Image (spheres, helix red, strand yellow):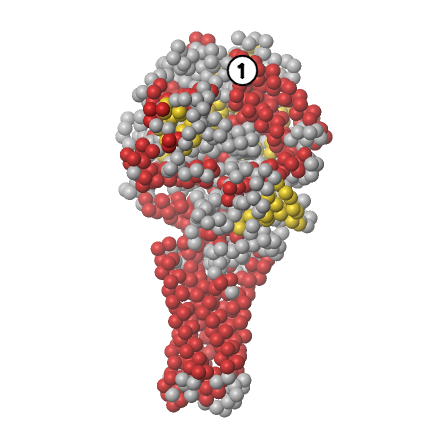
Amino acid sequence: MVTVTHSGQRRTPKAAKTSSVFKKVVMAVSGIILVLYLIAHMVGNLKLFAGAQTFNGYSEWIRRIGEPAVPGQTVLWIIRVVLLAAVVAHAWAAISLWRQAKRARPQQYVARKQVAQSYASRTMRWGGVILGLFIVYHILDLTLGVANPAGHDSTPYDRAIAGFSNPLVTLVYVVALLALGFHLRHGVWSATQTLGQSNKTRERTVNAFATVFAVVLTAGFLIPPLSVLVGIIE
Amino acid sequence: MALDLFTVGDPIADTKAPMDVPIGERWSERRFRAKLVNRANRRKLTVIVVGTGLAGGSAAATLGEAGYKVKSFWYQDSPRRAHSVAAQGGINAAKNYRNDGDSVHRLFYDTVKGGDFRSRENNVHRLAEVSVNIIDQCVAQGVPFAREYGGLLDNRSFGGTQVSRTFYARGQTGQQLLYGAYQALERQMAAGTVEQFARTEMLDLIVVDGRARGIVARDLVTGEISTHFADAVVLATGGYSNVFYLSTNAKGSNATAIWRAHKRGALFANPCYTQIHPTCIPVHGEYQSKLTLMSESLRNDGRVWVPKERGDDRDPRQIPEDERDYYLERLYPSFGNLVPRDIASRQAKNVCDEGRGVGPNGLGVYLDFAEAMQRLGRPAIEAKYGNLFDMYAQITGEDPYEVPMRIYPAVHYTMGGLWVDYDLQSTIPGLFVIGEANFSDHGANRLGASALMQGLADGYFVLPNTINDYLASGPFEKVDAGHPAAVQALEEVRAQTDRLLSINGNRTTASFHRELGRLMFDLCGMERSEESLRKALDRIPEIRQEFWTNVRVPGEAGRFNQSLEHAGRVADFIELAELMCVDALHRNESCGGHFRAESQTPDGEALRDDENYAYVAAWEWTPEGVPPVLHKEALEFEYVHLAQRSYK
Amino acid sequence: MNLKLRVWRQRSAAEKGKMVTYQVTDVSPDMSFLEMLDVLNEQLILDGEDPVSFDHDCREGICGSCGVMINGRAHGNGLFDDHPQTTTCQLHMRSFKDGDTIDIEPWRATAFPVIKDLAVDRSALDRIIQSGGYISAPTGTAPEAHSILVAKKDSDAAFDAATCIGCGACVAACPNASSMLFTASKVTHLGLMPQGQPERNDRVVNMIHQQDLEGFGGCTNIGECSASCPKGISMENISRLNHDLLGALRAGARPKS
């Protein structure tokens, strides 16, 4: 029998049902799925510059992928289900680790100074919450159209123009996309670590890549709405 | 001889080593003759191990592996904190991997000679024999020793030996070896063979019918004082350098366990043998709590000097060559700056006594790398000594690449300790003492990289074999907390604790400790004389008297109370200091770390007196007012012939 | 110099604590941080007050006993430019200026309950080692040391990881109070040695399991641990632990319950 020193003083922790590292792996893998989707999404968005017909056609094509082998929208729904699962898994892991961290330090420091923590890593959790809320709004706005001035029976192109012509809407998108950028900056590095793919020699490269990737993706997403706002796209 | 201070009792002798076979066969013969304990019986036998350094950690783990029920005690929060962790240099082993003529016999020979012929040949030979097993054991545990590109273990020469037999892990060998033992110990704790008592300090030994049967210990967190029982007790509680207050030992290192065992009847051997290490960072001021050692490898390239003129307080870089005294090179042309520790230390003291010391309080000498930097270039010096230079800069705020380092000797290791026989058993049956806590292997002076070797030899290989012979006659009659001896020991500990807390005087424990330490360093330090020791012996009882009437120990007994811990330790240091001075006074010869001003050659070198002092001085405790009793163990040198050291 | 200290005082784990302000005068720049606290304590004792408890032992930066939060940083690491990373006992007062206010707090984590004032119970780290941070090599069973060669680069990297002193600064500094850097250093050390291979999978799985059981937080790769570590243990170790853990789980290793 192992005698635990001063057992009277120790708070018995809740049995860890799932390893904290497993949660991180879930977060990394779901994050990678979401990032792959974001890359495709960003490329698609840039088609706004090619005009209404191309953009709407592209949107239509997404719904027809796989036809006639499978009925219409099958692939789209598969993507949607995978994305939803990824978002849920990502959020579950995040909330679970967040709660674990809260339990791990109930009493905060009176004085606290961070040196290694970046703005990106500090804002992962609240940034994630912002992104979650944004995704809901974004689907209501551009996918379903119910929150869009052009209404739900408009074309995707119309909805984009109608929405981003409003500076307030664009502002919401800009804020959310900046949050996304920071989220990606730490997320890419963290996923590399979590999946055990970083080491001392790679560390600089991984961090540099994370920064470049976050900037490129954020810029790619920001260009269409800002172009609509300033009238480059009409 | 100072016969007023002690009386001479019966001589003692080790009876365990089989003297009827040659020295190289004695250890295996001893193991053969020793009784064994059936594995099924081992779990009925309990062993208490106090201390978790190299000796205690390795012993507790090994006894646990063997199937004994082990109770492990330590005062720190984790076994990994034991002060073995701080050893820098390395560990010796007679592997002869360099093919440079090393052998068990040479390591044995060097250690007996290095100990200035004041150690027991049998023990030292066994130490040299098992040294090779230690390296195998540590490698198997995953200790990351320094290696060569081919994947083989690297060695270096250390402490003036002519062979390269020192294994090392950068400058943190003690740390890595300790973690190996610590991990083995934690493994046994998980396996349930070792029960752990963290932050628990042994305060007395329980002796029943002449046998060591348990300890009284205080839980330092709750303050609870309780009794613990076993069939044998092993003390692995380290040395007593902190009697000098400032030393390279950890702040918590103390003599309480061995001192209380001594007061229960265990003889204390050679208490005056202390090692003073020459390359430590000098004292800055009154508030200083601790001295830091820098590896003596620094003397390979650094040159030691002081100004020729006393009171020359110029910037050392402004002092021209011909106004400097490179005194070690002048006095010892063949060994120069690489003379053994005791000589380097004593000469530093001499030049400082002449008023030529450097630094704020005149207690320091320069260790200058300017010449080496010129010869080898700064990058080479950085590669060799970078971490030491950084440490020096961190502590002193001076850049040793620019200004010469200042160094001064500091107490570092105590060769004395509880007397043990070949089985490492003290004069109390069932009480075993291992590592620095015993007196056994280093004689009057310990060689570099030998402390780690001895700790692990005792813990991994010697004690686990010899203790069987004793335990084979157990399990002994059951003893519990209700036994009169246990009740009495517990009451005495409680009474002392209460007394300390009730004095409520005007001085802090630390002020007494500082006073005692300064007195011991000045009067019973690098050089001792009848005059200085008599002075110390006049003063120590006064300090003790004042301590017990004027110390202020705040707080309560039933709580975490670091002031109370310290006070108890200092009370024991004061008593031990007195015995050290008596021992130093009675030994009117110079040997190893013990330099008596009265016993020197015309040119000021140590002069041993083999005719009168080739013995171990084992002291029996007597109550206050009765002089201690000296028991002599005669030392025979069958294999290494007595010779005077010379480094001229 | 004269300083204002704000020190966390808490009589026991069961009682509530608070910051208490003390003035210390005549602090020498050559004092170590702990010697400065010694001076405060001597004064408190003579004034009839309760001295401040803090863990310390070797005072040369190797035993890992000491460690407090100094102005919000573990061991004060990261507060001073051009200051090597260090332990509290090796921080010297010359890093501070006359008139400074210094906040001193204990390591804060559920897994490190306060014993008194600045002293905390870090035995959770020992239990993580117990769960697998060793190589099973009972005394006497070892083969000749040279029978297994170890590449110098592996041995050196193992040593770098093995220099962890178990002080707990990584936990104290981590926004999640995670002990990942501690655990990773041991997993890396033993995982790089050939002798550590047979138990490699079980080791990492069990150590992570124990770490979670002790109530530490999860690692989110922020890096405060490494920035506060007195031995400069790098984040690379955490990546290596993760790599080993995924491999171990794929190989079917599961924690002992």
Q: Quadrant for residue A30, please give it.
A: bottom left
Give amino acid for label 1. Answer: Ser
Is C37 placed above or below B530 here? below
Regarding residue C154, the answer to whether it shows in the image is yes
Can residue A86 be seen at all in this image of the molecule? no
Task: Say if B427 sits above or below C161 in the image.
Answer: above
Left or right: B169 in relation to B15: left
In-front residue for pair A7/C44: C44
Percent x, y of residue B513: 59, 28
Q: Position of residue B424 (x, y in %)?
A: 49, 24
Chain letter of disc 1? Answer: B
Give whichever of B223, B247 is nearer the camera: B247
Q: Is residue B207 left or right of residue B325?
A: right
| Residue at image location 66% in from the left, 38% down from the top | C44
Which residue is more in the foreground, B244 or B190?
B244
Q: Which residue is mark 1?
A: B532
**Quadrant position of residue C238:** bottom left
Q: Is residue B296 above or below residue C253?
A: above
Q: Secondary structure at mark 1?
A: helix
The count of marks equals 1
Q: Residue at x 47, y 38 (%)?
A: B395
Relative to C42, say whether B537 is above or below.
above
Q: Which of B74 and B242 lies nearest the eye of the viewer? A: B242
Residue A120 in percent (x, y) is at: 48, 64
Q: Residue furthest bottom?
A: A153
